[in-house]
Amino acid sequence: MIQDYLNSVDKFIIIGDRVLVKPREMETHTKSGLVLPATVKEKEEIQSGYIIKTGPGYPIPSVEADEPWKAETNPTKYMGMQAREGDLAIFLKSQAHEIEFENEKFLIIPHAAILLLIRDDHELE
């Protein structure tokens, strides 16, 4: 399932500490069988989705700024993020930015908006 989306978004370059998420459809029925109207789903504060791509992480400032006119010799370094491609992310919906690409909806969210990651057990080793 996730591989289908990876092929269509290969050219995307995610910037900084952001992640690209394919949102999961919200449940329309409760476990007891009640049907939830659309207004209930719209008021949800959290949402879930699969991480399709991640940015490089948080940029770390360079400490060698003694002569600003010199060309930078060190490339930008980044502190990595916990989120990985394929993780199921639970995140704050209010911080998500929705985009549409090839008739598919995606969300761009900052890493700080992620509340929980669910990863397959074999990837934790």
Image (spheres, rainbow, N blue to C red):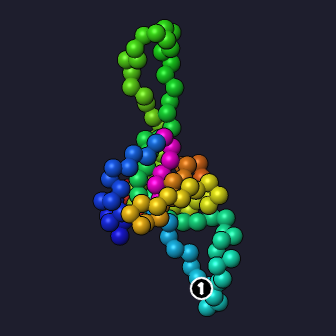
Q: Quadrant of residue 35?
A: bottom right
Q: Residue at x 42, y 67 (%)?
A: 103
- Looking at the image, residue 40 sits to the left or right of residue 20; the answer is right
Instruction: Give the farthest residue toward the bottom.
Output: 33
- Looking at the image, residue 21 sits to the left or right of residue 39; the answer is left
Q: Residue at x 50, y 47 (%)?
A: 18
Magenta highlight: main SS: strand
Q: Is residue 18 magenta?
A: yes
Q: Residue at x 49, y 33 (%)?
A: 59
Q: In the figure, 62 relative to 27: above or below? A: above
> What range of the chain is rendered magenta?
16-21
Front residue of 53/38: it is: 38
Which quadrant: the N terminus? bottom left
Q: Which residue is mark 1?
A: 29
Q: Where is residue 51 shown, x and y percent of the image?
A: 44, 58
Q: Residue at x 51, y 18 (%)?
A: 63
Q: In the figure, 64 relative to 79: above or below? A: above
Q: Where is residue 54 shown, x and y percent of the image?
A: 43, 49
- Looking at the image, residue 98 sits to the left or right of residue 52; the answer is right
Q: Where is residue 2 shown, x and y percent of the image?
A: 36, 65
Q: Is residue 118 magenta?
A: no
At mark 1, the secondary structure is loop
Front residue of 97/23: it is: 97
